[in-house]
Image (cartoon, rainbow, N blue to C red):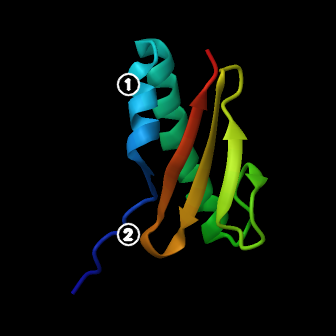
Amino acid sequence: MSEAPRRGWTVWTEEIPAQTMLDMPPDLSKKVVNFLSALALEVGGAVDRDRRPPGDPMDDLGIRFSLQIPGEPVVFEYTVLREIAEIRIPVLVWFL
């Protein structure tokens, strides 16, 4: 009996950050989605190797981090949910 392949890390965006992304120009929104998708893989790789995920830590537990998307007026916070291999975006700020 073979084992099912392990599901990769995913990203979940809360309602308000998702609405913010919908309000952005399409090219910026696409960049943000691509960045967050790539970040989920990067975070997963770091966590799976017992390394600190990218970004500035916002707690002492290694769960909450903040980042700015390089070259873009977008800052966000994310949380690491190791047990379900997911990052969540509860806060995303777009500076107009």
- Check disc 1: other Cα within 10 Å, few if <14, some if 14-19, many if 20+: few
The residue positioned 51% from the left and 50% from the top of the image is 90
User: In this image, 77 relative to 54: left or right?
Assistant: left
Say whether disc 1 or disc 2 marks the residue closer to the N-terminus.
2
Q: CA distance from mark 1 to mark 2?
A: 31 Å
Q: Please state which of the two labelled residues, at mark 1 or mark 2, is closer to the viewer.
A: 1
- Amino acid on which disc 2 is placed: Arg
* Residue 19 x, y percent position in the rendering: 39, 32
Between 26 and 34, the one nearer to me in the picture: 26
Q: Residue lying farthest left? A: 1
Q: Name the amino acid, label 1.
A: Leu
Q: Residue furthest bottom?
A: 1
Q: Which residue is mark 2?
A: 6
Disc number for residue 84: none
Q: Quadrant of the C terminus?
A: top right
Q: Give SS at disc 1.
A: helix
Q: Quadrant of residue 72?
A: top right
Residue at image point 53% right, 51% down: 41
Which residue is painted at 46% across and 32% down in the image? 33
Task: Identify which residue is drawn at 48% across, 42% down.
Answer: 37
Left or right of 88, for residue 68: right
The correct choice, above or below, for 41 with respect to 59 in the image is: above
Please name whichever residue, 9 or 55, is drawn nearer the observer in this view of the structure: 55
Say whether residue 14 is left or right of residue 43.
left
Q: Is residue 90 left or right of residue 18?
A: right
Q: Which numbered circle lies on residue 22?
A: 1
Element at badge 2?
A: loop
Residue 12 rendering spot, x and y as whole percentages: 41, 51
